[in-house]
Image (cartoon, rainbow, N blue to C red):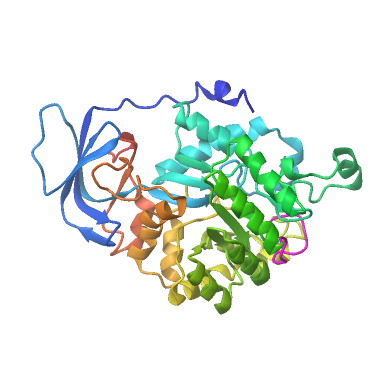
């Protein structure tokens, strides 16, 4: 993988960045208030927002002017749960044995660009060894993609959702030996600390644990608890030493409860969340990232013979269908919700469909848009994105119409700017 960036250098050339760019927006979504404002001019300089001016402002000579008539401008969206190194298909399980990391790296380049052009200027990649390298290639300007906050290898317990040897036969298991903290598999408090420190050594930005079984892993249970509270606390406490936040994949109630008690920043999926857990999350300030898209996708694909292995299929049917209902209940209960799709389960670039599913679950359109902007920035622990304000990153997208009035407009993004660089603009 160390040579991947060099291999990919010729795949993309970034567009030149103008010194000053003015965006004339017919409407502007204010992510702090959740309101759509009238006409504004957004002046961009050196990758940041220099001014936000009501109305159509007069510009200095030489300013590049982009007129977004009929459009609403918004802060670039953040998807807090993606896997850019893969994409679900009936071949996914065999490809892990046939393909090398470099094969997944080349695929990830296209997935990253699709994600960016769909309006997602930042993502949190929650599990995948390719992601830190892809992040670096994007940051170096070698390929086009969103800003990546990468977890690297997820941390699991033996036989857990992110144990990389699940499904191996006895010969392979004996040959490779049991995975340990270096490979992200732990069985004690001491292992937990070592696994976090290894992620730091590997260059991760965030820690991901699999607090319960999962839908797509080659294992029977999709909801059994897989960490003790003490192990979770050891991970969270060690992560704090390195400035890391911890995201916890969790479907089952007991594993979810242990993760919240252990101090994780966010619960991902949360399928079997109970009223008790919702109250506990509110008490602890724990975020919920529902990933409704993934639930609906796997429930749908489980109806197709041969799409999933038979050990996976019943989990996909049972668990996937519940997530949207849980998300609606969590919203009504006042749990803090942020945006994530688990994309990589579904096709990259279709991330915005999650907004539609969130509104179907009972969330207002403005709330869903805030979940992918200012709230997502809070989850990440950053204060330079998620809003269109002077001094913030010039991550700005635009789409025809008003997404608060018609959430379906989120599927029509035709202008994308990241760090002041335009990657997509409307066809004249």
| Residue 163 can be seen in this image | no
**Is residue 156 on the magenta stretch?**
no
Camera-nearest residue between 161 and 261: 261
| Direction from residue 377 to residue 168 in the image, left or right | right
Q: Quadrant location of residue 86?
A: top right
Q: Residue at x 62, y 69 (%)?
A: 257
Q: Quadrant of the N terminus?
A: top right
Q: Nearer the viewer, residue 332 or 356?
A: 332
Residue 321 placement: quadrant: bottom right
Q: Could you tell me residue 38's position as x and y percent? A: 16, 56
Farthest bottom residue in view: 275
Q: Residue 84 in the image: state x and y as whole percent.
A: 56, 42
Magenta residues, dominant SS class: loop
Residue 406, given in percent of the width and then of the height, sits at 31, 63
Q: Please provide percent x and percent y for residue 349.
A: 47, 47
In the rendered view, does 371 fall on the left or right side of 18? Answer: right
Query: In this rendering, is residue 170 above or below 360?
Result: above
The reply, left or right, for residue 73 in relation to residue 127 is left
Q: Front-most of 302 and 122?
A: 122
Seen at 89% across and 38% down, the residue is 175
- Quarter of the image with the C terminus in it: top left
Looking at the image, residue 151 lies above or below residue 370: above
Res 129 → quadrant = top right
For residue 220: magenta?
Answer: yes
Residue 235 in view, yes or no: yes
Give the magenta-colored segment's residue range.
Answer: 216-227
Residue drawn at point x = 51 percent, y = 64 percent: 286
């Amino acid at each position: 993988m160390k040579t991947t960036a060099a291999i990919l250098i010729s795949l993309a050339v970034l567009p030149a960045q103008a010194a000053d760019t003015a965006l004339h927006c017919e409407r502007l979504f204010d992510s702090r208030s959740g309101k759509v404002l009238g006409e504004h001019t957004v002046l961009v300089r050196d990758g940041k927002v220099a001014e936000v001016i009501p109305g159509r402002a007069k510009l200095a000579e030489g300013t590049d002017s982009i007129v977004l008539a009929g459009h609403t401008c918004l802060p670039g969206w953040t998807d807090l749960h993606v896997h850019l190194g893969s994409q679900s298909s009936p071949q996914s399980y065999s490809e892990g044995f046939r393909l090398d990391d470099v094969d997944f790296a080349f695929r990830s380049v296209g997935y990253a660009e699709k994600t960016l052009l769909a309006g997602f200027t930042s993502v949190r990649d929650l599990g995948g060894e390719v992601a830190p390298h892809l992040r670096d290639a994007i940051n170096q300007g070698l390929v086009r993609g969103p800003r990546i906050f990468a977890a690297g290898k997820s941390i699991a317990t033996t036989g857990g959702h992110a144990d990389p040897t699940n499904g191996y036969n006895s010969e392979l298991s004996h040959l490779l030996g049991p995975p340990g903290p270096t490979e992200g598999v732990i069985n004690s408090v001491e292992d937990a600390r070592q696994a976090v420190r290894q992620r730091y050594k590997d260059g991760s930005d965030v820690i991901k644990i699999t607090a319960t079984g999962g839908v797509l892993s080659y294992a029977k249970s999709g909801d059994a608890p897989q960490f003790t509270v003490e192990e979770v606390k050891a991970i969270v406490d060690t992560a704090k030493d390195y400035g890391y936040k911890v995201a916890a994949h969790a479907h089952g109630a007991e594993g979810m409860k242990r993760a919240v008690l252990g101090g994780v920043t966010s619960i991902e999926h949360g399928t079997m969340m109970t009223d008790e857990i919702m109250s506990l999350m509110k008490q602890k300030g724990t975020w919920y990232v529902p990933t409704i898209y993934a639930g609906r996708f796997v429930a749908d694909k489980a109806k197709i013979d041969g799409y999933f292995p038979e050990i996976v299929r019943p989990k996909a049917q049972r668990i996937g269908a519940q997530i949207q209902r849980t998300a609606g209940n969590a919203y009504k209960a006042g749990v803090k919700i942020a945006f994530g799709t688990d994309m990589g389960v579904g096709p990259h670039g279709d991330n915005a469909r999650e907004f539609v599913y969130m509104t179907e679950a009972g969330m207002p359109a403005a709330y869903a848009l805030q979940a992918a902007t200012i709230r997502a920035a809070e989850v990440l622990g950053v204060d330079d994105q998620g809003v269109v304000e002077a001094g913030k990153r010039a991550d700005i997208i635009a789409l025809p119409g008003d997404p608060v009035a018609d959430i379906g407009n989120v599927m029509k993004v035709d202008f994308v700017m990241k760090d002041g660089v335009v990657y997509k603009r409307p066809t004249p």
